[in-house]
Image (tube, rainbow, N blue to C red):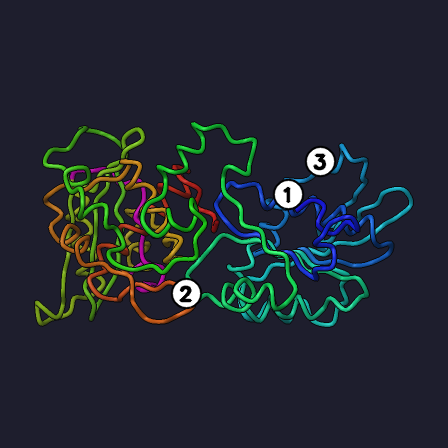
Amino acid sequence: MLTWWCAASPAHTCDALICDGAVRSGKTVCMALSFLCWATACFDGAQFGICGKSVSGVRHNVVTAVEPWLRRLGLRWTENRTEHYLELGCRGRSNRFYLFGGYDEKSAALIQGITFAGVLLDEAALMPRSFVEQACARCSVAGSRLWFNCNPDGPLHWFFVEWIKKCRRKGLLYLHFTMDDNLSLSEPIKERYRRQYTGVFYERFILGHWVVAEGLVYALVAEHPERYILHELPFNDGQFYISIDYGTVNPCSMGLWCVNGRRAVRVKEWYFDSRRAQRQMTDEEYYARLEELASGYYIQKVIVDPSAASFIETIRRHRKFLVREAENDVVNGIRVTASLLAAGMVQVMDVCRDCRREFGLYRWADEKLDRDTVIKENDHAMDELRYFCATILSREFRWVDWRKR
């Protein structure tokens, strides 16, 4: 990766480099360093793009990560945080590197009209296709090259289909990374990462395979219920939270959680299916059930489905509970939840019958899509479980990295 663009390399005629594979395999830092060295060695007074899911993500994952290496190489740089660019110079040469965030389809407009001598797309599989293709179209300077890295997704993902599977036809260099390629990782650290992921996430993030998500989402709970379903609460005190998946026509699920040390247990639940009951409840009635579930406990926070604006306002109006909108990235939230379950940090009391029932029914959809989806049935306690894990355990307690890979 470091020298593919050099004249002595057999790959120097390739127009682009694609690197995928396992997490923590070193591909991002190595690619960023190679990209900046290539740009400095081959151009002067040119413009380049460094793109990621967000500008802050680019700054953290790419710029900050390579700063120590740039100093050792004697490169000088200044950063304009207002206009999001770096000026990088060495031995009389100077180039400008713009930072872009490809968050959604609208992001493609941000990059239109600019001319690049090269572009680096960090985590290309997480960005919209329109943004990636617009960034590539901006590279019209003679000698320009494209640089991509990503962790795998599903086998029907557009980036895998259009770029990786067609790399030879397009004259691209494709390199696959594993954690063993990162010589800074010790064996105990690598083993910890292997324990952190399960199912499809193990296949993708540890083995680096582009595989389909299928079957039960949390299959490990069905396979080893004795590890995750408790008959007695292992502790008597801790910090208590309530997570809620709000529904009027659809079921409403509330779960009471206790966090003690490095363990979180779903102590009890309240679950209401309006179709089964043949009646709907008002926000005030739901709030009354919330107070009943919280009775006898000091609740740190109530985490609620962010789409439930009216119910969130009802909770705030009563001025009894601190309420927070839940993190609602479905696939990333599932990844976080699966990691916490695999680590034995999240368990459920046997009295949580609807949560236990949904563990055995919550499945990946088998639709032929280029993204992962779950079947929108038997998912209300599962959504509420995900809200708690992604918002409190991951974001606030930082038990697992909440950021998109």
Instruction: Return the residue at label 3.
Output: 69
Q: Nearer the viewer, residue 389 or 302?
A: 389
Whether residue 229 is in magenta: the answer is no
Residue drawn at (80%, 47%) of the image: 88
Compute the Cα span from label 3 to label 1: 10 Å
User: Tag 2: residue type?
Assistant: Arg
Q: For marks 2 and 3, give the CA distance.
A: 36 Å
Q: Which one is in front, 205 or 52?
A: 205
Q: Which residues fall within the magenta stretch?
A: 296-312
Disc 2, SS = loop
> Quarter-wise, where is residue 183 in the image?
top right
In the rendered structure, find residue 30 and report the number of the disc placed on it: 1
Classify residue 104 as left or right of residue 303.
right
Q: Which residue lies most toward the left here?
A: 277
Going from the N terminus, do you reach mark 2 or mark 3 first? Answer: 3
Q: Amino acid at mark 3?
A: Trp
Q: Residues within 10 Å of mark 1 (few under 14, many from 20)?
A: some
Q: Quadrant of residue 305?
A: bottom left
Query: On the rendered structure, is 350 left or right of 147?
Result: left
Of 386 and 129, nearer the camera is 129
The answer to whether residue 306 is left or right of residue 17 is left
Which residue is at a point 44% across and 33% down the rendered structure image?
190
Of tags 1 and 2, the one toward the viewer is: 1
**Front disc: 3 or 1:** 1
The residue at 36%/43% (across/down) is 197
State if disc 1 and disc 3 touch (CB < 8 Å). Answer: no
Q: Residues within 10 Å of mark 2 (few under 14, many from 20)?
A: some
Q: Determine the residue positioned at 71% across, 36% down.
A: 69
Q: Which residue is mark 2?
A: 371
Cα separation between marks 1 and 2: 28 Å
x then y, percent, for residue 120: 66, 56
Nearest the viewer among 279 and 6 is: 6
